[in-house]
Amino acid sequence: MTTHSMISLASIETEGRLRALDPVWVSVLAEEFARDGQTDAIRVVARGNGFKLVKGARRIAAALQLGWSEIEARIEPEEALPDDAAVRLAEIKSNMLRSDLTALDRAVYVAAWCEIYQGAQPAQKPGRKKAAEAAPESDEELSTKLVLNWTEAAQQALKIGRMGIFRSLKIAKIEGDLRSRIALHAIADVQRELLLLAELTPVRQRAVVDLLTSDPAKATSVTEALALLDHAPGAKPVPVYERMYERFVRLKAPEKEAFFEMNAEAIDVWLAKRATKRGRAA
């Protein structure tokens, strides 16, 4: 049975939230709380002697900023959301229905939803499998399956068709610390910029984010940052293999397979050398 009560802020577990907190919004909420008090309860689920947050991270941050020790909460029984996956799914659903999510926020939520979906699938029975059966699902295959979990109305409201899911999965592959650094940057709400960043090598991604966040006057977009990195006087040339990688990741699965076939001999030699190195290290 769901109840409402004042609970200690110290008793609420808030770690691992998917969405970065915007300090500006937290300050605005703190001002409202100071003037009008808390008008909307947070949502938590009981966990042992404490609680796990489902919805209300900004409100908690605002309350802490004001020095409060307690906050009003809607408390759900532990059996309502029995594990971390159930809590995560509730967080995703409640936030995806908001209208103020950035393109980056949405991508992170979609990717997390995909992880929950995959984790809920029945385990493969033991035994030998064909290579095609044993291979993990591609983003294209996963996108096609997942879109069927949403009603047509939900797809229209959330703009979450198959291609939308596919693009979100690509964006969410940007390293977590880099996502955090650009969460409040203007590019966080421009999908094409995020996709461009996602297609770069990890080294290049980091260089672009460093430039965007360290000196915004020099570059305001991924395109501008790349231009500076590639053409600035004294800039370190981009290795050929990184340029090839950036083109390779844009290929479709059959095109990648064809590339592997064309380079099978070189790949076999590399795999043999890698196995030898690992054997020595062991």
Image (cartoon, rainbow, N blue to C red):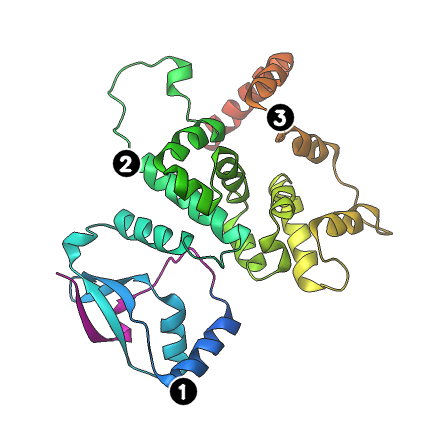
Q: Nearer the viewer, mark 1 or mark 2?
A: 1
The residue identified by callout 1 is: 35
The residue sitting at 68% across, 51% down in the picture is 208
x and y percent of residue 73 in the render? Answer: 25, 70
Instruction: State which quadrant residue 126 falls in.
Output: top left
The residue identified by callout 2 is: 120
Q: Is residue 13 magenta?
A: yes
Q: Amino acid at mark 1?
A: Arg
Q: Is residue 160 magenta?
A: no
The residue sitting at 34% across, 83% down in the picture is 37
Q: Amino acid at mark 3?
A: Leu
The residue sitting at 28% across, 31% down in the picture is 121
Residue reaching furthest left? 1
Label 3 – label 2 distance at C-alpha: 30 Å
> Mark 3 falls on what kind of element?
loop
Q: Earlier in the sequence, mark 1 or mark 2?
A: 1
Left or right of 208 on screen, residue 50? left
Q: Earlier in the sequence, mark 3 or mark 2?
A: 2
In magenta, the rendered stretch is 1-20
Q: Quarter of the image containing the C terminus? A: top left
The residue identified by callout 3 is: 251
Q: Nearer the viewer, mark 3 or mark 1?
A: 1
Disc 2 crowd, CA 10 A, few/some/many (<14, 14-19, 20+): few
Q: Is residue 48 above or below residue 133?
A: below
